[in-house]
Amino acid sequence: MERINRWRAFGGWQEVWRHDSKTTGTPMEFSIFLPEGEGPKPVLWYLSGLTCNWSNVTEKGDYREACARHGIVFVAPDTSPRGEGVADDAEGAYDFGLGAGFYVDATEEPFAKHYKMRQYIEEELPALIAEHFPVDLNRQAITGHSMGGHGALTIGLRNPERFKSVSAFAPISAPTECPWGHKALGGYLGEDRAAWAEYDACKLIEGGARVAALKVDQGGADGFLEEQLKPELLRETCDTAGQVVELEIHDGYDHSYYFISSFMPAHIDWHAKYLKA
């Protein structure tokens, strides 16, 4: 563990750390906001979208004031393994390979060696955070944006006993039904679509997965809304299955951090209700 940066903010500390991951076989970085006061404190995980790393939400997410007010630790990991020898898309596309790990454990070569983002987020990183920081892993919540919203939904649905609440900003709600998902899941997992289901929130809900509290916010002017994100499929699936979801479409907002930062404090306030219960 090496701390590579630190800033004072809202009475607490915003830090960035690097460590050698046994899961991915690469160095990995994450940012963590530590509110002032004694721990252990609840933790909110944030999973970023395509092309991003920890820096996007850390610099533009506007979460620190709300986290400081509620005493919530905020952790933002990277979106893929990186470094020498890590496979990338052969044509350098933005939606596959580096920066686009899709929070899956890849089984297809050459990605299977390093692209183990599911295991990294579900197992290695929580254990590392618990070892080095004053967090209470009995009080966890998860959120994310776009590809990271997909990650938050699927990780939350696969681990309902772990998370008090699950939310997402403009998530890829049904990756088995959109081009981004077809490319990523096919490339990382192969063409057997049965293997894709555990990485699709709608499929997981159809299969019986449930979470205690679910919230989704979506920009109505998002250019990816119809082709890639498909929140209507998530709403229909939840309604059919009896999974309660707070899903709101916000007119005029796009896919950017202008949208995310506008609603991030409300998401943290919402998570705080469950993390303090």
Image: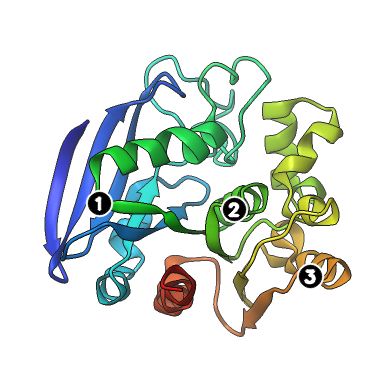
Q: Is residue 226 above or below residue 122?
A: below
Q: Which residue is mark 1?
A: 134
The foreground one among 86 and 47 is: 47
Q: Earlier in the sequence, mark 2 or mark 1?
A: 1
How many marks on residues? 3
Q: Amino acid at mark 1?
A: Pro
Quadrant position of residue 7: bottom left
The foreground one among 78 and 258 is: 78
Q: Earlier in the sequence, mark 2 or mark 3?
A: 2
Q: Residue at x 60, y 48 (%)?
A: 155
Which element type, helix, strand or loop, lies under badge 1? loop
User: Can residue 99 be seen from the camera position used here?
Assistant: no
User: What is the C-alpha distance between the residues marked 2 and 3?
Assistant: 26 Å
Q: Amino acid at mark 2?
A: Glu
Q: Comparing marks 2 and 3, which lies closer to the viewer?
A: 2
Q: Which residue is mark 2?
A: 161
Which element type, helix, strand or loop, lies under badge 3? helix
Which element type, helix, strand or loop, lies under badge 2? loop
| Labels 2 and 1 touching (C-beta < 8 A) | no
Q: Is residue 111 left or right of residue 8?
A: right
Q: Which residue is mark 3?
A: 232
Q: Which mark is residue 92?
A: none
